[in-house]
Amino acid sequence: MVLGRFVDRLVGSERLYVFEELYIVPGRAPVDPDKVRLETRFSRSIRLGIPVASAPMDMVTGVEMAVALALRGGIGVLHRNCSREEQVEMARRVKEHPPVPLTGLRLSPVEPACRALGELRAAGVRDAPVVDSAGRVLGYVRLSSLRGCCREGRSVGECVEPGEVYLLGEAGEAMRVLERGGRDTAAVVSSTGYYLGTIVFDAVFEELSPVLDEDGRLRVAAAISPFDMERARMLDGVVDALVSDVAHFHNDNVLRAAARLAKEVSADFIAGNIGTAAAARDVASIIERVDGFRVGIGGGSICVTAQVAGAFAPTPWAVAQVRDALEELGMGDVPVIADGGIRTPADAVKSLALGASCVMLGYVLAGTDEASAPLIRIGGRAYKPYRGMASRGALEKRFAADRYSRIVKRMPEGIEGLVEYKGPVSRVLAEFVEGLKAGIGYAGASSIPELWEKAVLGRAPPRGERGLILSI
Ligand code: XMP
């Protein structure tokens, strides 16, 4: 067990510690929370605006989640529970997406003008593109002309005016047109003229700071198995980082395979999951190039590894162990990604304070509009499925079944369930970011690097157990 500047913050701690028993000791805040800066890194060469990555799970990260995160300063890690071709296609779609949000706001030419009027009012826009059932953009309708059309009982198709449509690469031009204020929406089409989405000018825009590659495209990462060289080769050159997706990376066969793979690819290579300082040292000695570490074993909300196998490297403990080992090895600049069990911004702040550069989120992002799971309604309430990648359901698809060993295992180490529908991921992220800023401020820091220097953590029984308020 290493003792170093992060582990030392938990004086006298010999035992594994979990998020619930850790607290940030309040320090002198140099700035107000809104001035706290969240810039960080995901891997050696990928800079982020916020310390958030999505977990490569088939109910969380597909194209929509990866786009939404990259637009807002984070990064998505595409899941691998699909064929190689499907995963490459997802990555291409993220790369082809303009660095502005596309919505599905459009009207059909056959719908009554009165209904369309209500839709535009609800969306808070003055116009919208009109798209026929074959995906062709017929033009735009304006709120002002819809009013007259509604009175006359006409349909949307009878009120269409011509207007510009934009190719994906022309999103910047579309934005400039919208900024001039003449209209609120711009339709984006494929090279064959097929409707892809609508850019809506609203306040959200000004807050976006997309994470872009050298060519101005959204950054994206993809999960791989170290044993699947073919998949890694196909994704290399499309994605910015390849993220190892095995439960126990500290395994001789995995290490050997990963060493070969990391040599072959040019994208950043992220090793994981590991949970101890010893694992970090072994990875560093066996694999020539590692650009980041995914850290935490058995702590995920859907994990039953600790129950099934008895193994557990809780995320906060594992992060501190690994970060100290890396500093000892002179690899302090290699980012640590805290992965598993992060349910609140508080857990994320604790992870960052213990040496992580960013956090990986499954549960927090599951249940959002952009999570790649269907919406389910039960008794008037809405939910989305969420499952571990080693749950029975996920293993049935088999593509990610080698997560736990090269030889596919049958014993599930994950569970399946439903999470409450949470609305758009933009809302979830906005709240999360606010919590992060507050937490970093309480710790007495104004940025993540300053948090590493200044944070002090203490241990106390989980507050939830005290039952402070009794309802009468
Ligand atoms: P959260 O807590 O954010 O955790 O939902 C997401 C992380 O959990 C890991 N993961 C699993 N761990 N069995 C496990 O033991 C599983 O079936 C499983 N699926 C995902 C993974 O590290 C993910 O990022």
Image: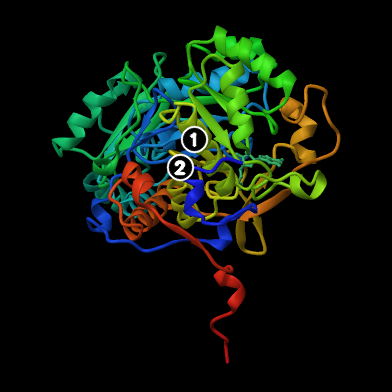
Which residue is disc 2 drawn over?
355
Q: Residue 131: x, y in percent?
A: 40, 31
Q: How far apart are the alpha carbons under marks 2 and 1?
A: 7 Å
Which image quarter: residue 38? top left
Q: Nearer the viewer, residue 307 or 221?
A: 307
Q: Residue at x 67, y 53 (%)?
A: 418
Helix, strand, or loop for circle 2? loop
Q: Around disc 2, counting alpha carbons within 10 Å, would you say few (fewer than 14), some (14 to 19), or many (20 or more)? A: many
Q: Residue 225: x, y in percent?
A: 66, 22
Q: Earlier in the sequence, mark 2 or mark 1?
A: 1
| Amino acid type indicated by mark 2 | Gly
Residue 249 position (above or below residue 184): above
- The tally of labels here is 2
Which residue is disc 1 drawn over?
336
Q: Are marks 2 and 1 in contact (CB under 8 Å)?
A: yes
Q: Residue 102: x, y in percent?
A: 38, 34
Looking at the image, can residue 127 be seen?
no
Q: Nearer the viewer, residue 155 or 91?
A: 91
Which image quarter: residue 216? top left
Q: Nearer the viewer, residue 324 or 288?
A: 324
- Judged left or right of residue 455, residue 361 is right
- Judged left or right of residue 357, residue 214 is left
Q: Residue 54: x, y in percent?
A: 52, 38
Looking at the image, can residue 372 be seen?
yes
Residue 28 position (above or below residue 371): below
Q: Nearer the viewer, residue 426 or 330?
A: 330
Which image quarter: residue 332? top left
